[in-house]
Image: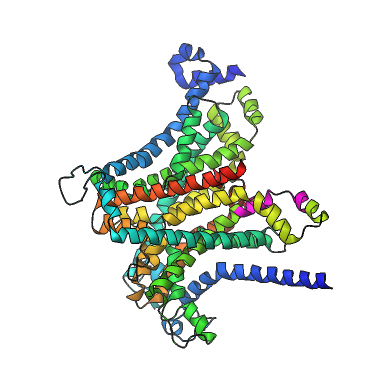
């Protein structure tokens, strides 16, 4: 099979026939692989790696856009953030948001996966429908739910009023606590389909024989669930935790379109604080520092999950 | 008897949960659609009507009427202003998303093919590099990309935005497509190579057609991401002629308390959501397959 491969190279390289013929198959694979990879590498380097380093450089400077000078200030941007009351507040808020978001998304996603894992008539249609929120642009999902929470004609007010639970329409998003919870629900609505699909993949990879064997041995359905389903889904749980922590720590789009940080800063998460610092106050060095802090927290969580799941295995 | 009762209860619970899931998923859309086709008087009614009394298409005509050139469509006067930004944004989003998808699929499939088929020096290091870039939060990119775009005058450029989206999704694309290529037996390609087919020819006539489900799934996911991405579009596309649809949606959502016409806002949401949702519904088989085959785990 060597011959045609060599012909191939000869055709491509015209005048370099002699030289190319000396190449071993291995060298040829090397060259092909790198030619195939170069476009991707260039794009990823230019658009991701270079900006990332640029952000690191920015975060070490007092980088204000309208000023000409950018003094190098070591880690002052990071240190000043630790003393910034508003930033600490936003960090706590982000962690609360992430916790609530994770719990809700995992709860809904898991239930949906369990339902979809059963055989029923409209299963295919249902599985397709469940994917819909995942396809919705994040800002649009903020808009959809803003329509539902609307103080003057929203669906939520309408339902509660029709049921006689409230007498007057309530401006939900004007109340800090409620706005925060509603933000969690809104993001969970868009994010649960992916989690449900991951769990579904995990559930379908569990062979049915195990359940049958347990049934024969007299295990109740609850026991089967706790002793078979949950332990075997550990891999899925790991993936979900890593991905969903990443998503919830960087939540931005829904906040922008649903509450824009309000009311009274009650929905300003770290990512939104970064947006304010960089694009309202033009403190780019500071903003870049916040972005790196978010990245570090994400990384810390990922390592934490790896440690937990790894220790359980040994 | 007791066992029988229990199964009835379980069945009932499962049935109810199915309906609840359906309502949770579709309810918000129904409400949005309802608002978009209600008259301004009707949607302010308390309590709300669940089925519109008349079909009111003025919002849709306001948005798309401009395309047909007239100031009047079907006898309805087109309102100037905000609605006009939507078709432009839809066009921009379509251009950006399709460009990003093409770039991503072409370059991604080349790289994934190399990873799947060849052994080469630094292969594992490169692969690890892609995995790490995939896991890094995109939030870090926002500020430097804005600054770089300002310095080199790259903002308000749809092609630049498409390349950025392609780059962000490339590592993910490579991981998924590699999985798909791995499933295609190499024997087929070897046979073609022996028959004198070129490497590129093999890729074009054998591997890519066989990997089509994977390409479709990945393509749709990239398209969706590029269609919905907001933060980078917000900071890069300030020109009204270049802005993409998520930015317009966010503007409409924020103006909810100042614009009286909620119908138009709801219509904007419907219009922005329609293309990706339709794509996902059409290709859901491939996408679920792609997701279930472990692509997300990569």
Near-viewer residue (B62 or A80): A80
Question: Which residue, as the protein is rendered here, is positioned at the far right?
Answer: B1
Where's the N terminus of chain A, which quadrant? top right
Res B133 → quadrant: top left
The answer to whether residue B168 is visible is: yes
> Which residue sits at x=82%, y=54%?
A217
Residue, x 53% and y 32% (percent of image)? B115
Q: Is A151 included in the stretch rendered in magenta?
A: no
For this view, does B8 lie left or right of residue A38? right
- Tag count in the figure? 0
| Magenta stretch bounds | A199-211
Q: Magenta segment, principal secondary structure?
A: helix
Q: Is residue B61 visible?
A: no
Q: Quadrant of residue B247?
A: bottom left
Image coords of residue B94 (percent x, y): 43, 54
Q: Position of residue A306 (x, y in %)?
A: 52, 44
Q: Residue at x 53, y 15 (%)?
A: A24
């Amino acid at each position: 099979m060597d011959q045609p491969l060599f012909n191939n190279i000869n055709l491509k390289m015209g005048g370099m026939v002699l030289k190319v013929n000396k190449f071993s198959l291995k060298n040829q694979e090397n060259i092909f692989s790198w030619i195939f990879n170069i476009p991707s590498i260039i794009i990823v380097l230019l658009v991701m790696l270079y900006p990332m380093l640029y952000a690191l450089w920015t975060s070490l400077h007092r980088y204000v856009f309208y000023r000409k000078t950018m003094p190098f200030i070591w880690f002052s941007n990071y240190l000043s953030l630790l003393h910034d009351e508003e930033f600490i507040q936003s960090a706590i808020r982000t962690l609360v948001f992430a916790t609530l978001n994770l719990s809700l998304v995992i709860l809904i996603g898991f239930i949906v996966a369990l339902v979809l894992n059963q055989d029923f008539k409209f299963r295919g249609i249902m599985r397709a429908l469940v994917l819909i929120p995942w396809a919705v642009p994040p800002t649009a999902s903020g808009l959809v739910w803003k329509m539902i929470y609307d103080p003057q004609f929203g669906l939520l007010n309408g339902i509660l009023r029709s049921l006689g639970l409230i007498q007057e329409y309530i401006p939900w998003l004007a109340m800090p606590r409620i706005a925060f919870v509603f933000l969690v629900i809104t993001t969970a609505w868009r994010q649960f389909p992916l989690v449900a699909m991951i769990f579904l993949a995990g559930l379908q990879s569990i062979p049915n024989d195990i359940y049958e064997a347990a049934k024969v041995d007299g295990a109740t359905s609850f026991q089967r669930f706790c002793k078979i389903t949950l332990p075997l889904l550990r891999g899925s749980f790991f993936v979900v935790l890593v991905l969903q922590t990443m998503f919830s720590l960087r939540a931005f789009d829904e906040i922008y379109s649903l509450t824009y940080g309000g009311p009274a800063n009650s929905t300003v998460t770290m990512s939104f604080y970064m947006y304010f610092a960089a694009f309202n106050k033009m403190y780019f060095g500071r903003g870049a520092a916040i972005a790196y802090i978010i990245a570090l927290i994400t990384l810390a969580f990922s390592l934490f999950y790896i440690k937990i799941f790894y220790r359980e295995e040994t | 008897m007791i066992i029988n009762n229990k199964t009835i209860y379980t069945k009932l619970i499962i049935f109810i949960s199915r309906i609840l899931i359906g309502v949770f998923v579709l309810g918000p859309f129904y409400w949005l659609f309802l608002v978009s086709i209600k008259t301004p008087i009707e949607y302010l009614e308390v309590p709300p009507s669940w089925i519109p009394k008349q079909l009111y298409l003025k919002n849709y005509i306001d948005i798309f009427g401009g395309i047909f050139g007239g100031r009047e469509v079907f006898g309805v006067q087109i309102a100037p202003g905000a609605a006009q930004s939507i078709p432009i944004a839809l066009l921009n989003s379509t251009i950006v998303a399709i460009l990003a998808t093409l770039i991503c699929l072409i370059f991604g499939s080349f790289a994934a093919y190399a990873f799947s088929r060849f052994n080469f020096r630094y292969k594992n290091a490169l692969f690890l590099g892609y995995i790490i870039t995939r896991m890094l939060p995109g939030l870090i990119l926002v500020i430097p990309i804005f600054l770089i775009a300002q310095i080199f005058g790259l903002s308000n450029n749809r092609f630049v935005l498409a390349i950025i989206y392609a780059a962000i999704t490339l590592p993910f694309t490579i991981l998924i497509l590699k999985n798909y290529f791995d499933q295609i037996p190499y024997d087929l390609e070897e046979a073609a190579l022996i028959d004198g087919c070129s490497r590129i020819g093999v890729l074009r006539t054998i591997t890519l057609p066989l990997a089509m489900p994977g390409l479709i799934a990945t393509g749709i996911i990239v398209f969706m991401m590029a269609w919905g991405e907001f933060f980078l579009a917000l900071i890069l596309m300030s020109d009204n002629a270049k802005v993409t649809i998520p930015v317009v949606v966010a503007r409409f959502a924020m103006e909810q308390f100042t614009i009286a016409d909620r119908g138009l806002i709801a219509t904007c949401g419907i219009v922005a959501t329609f293309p990706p949702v339709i794509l996902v519904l059409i290709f859901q088989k491939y996408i679920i397959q792609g997701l279930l085959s472990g692509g997300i785990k990569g």
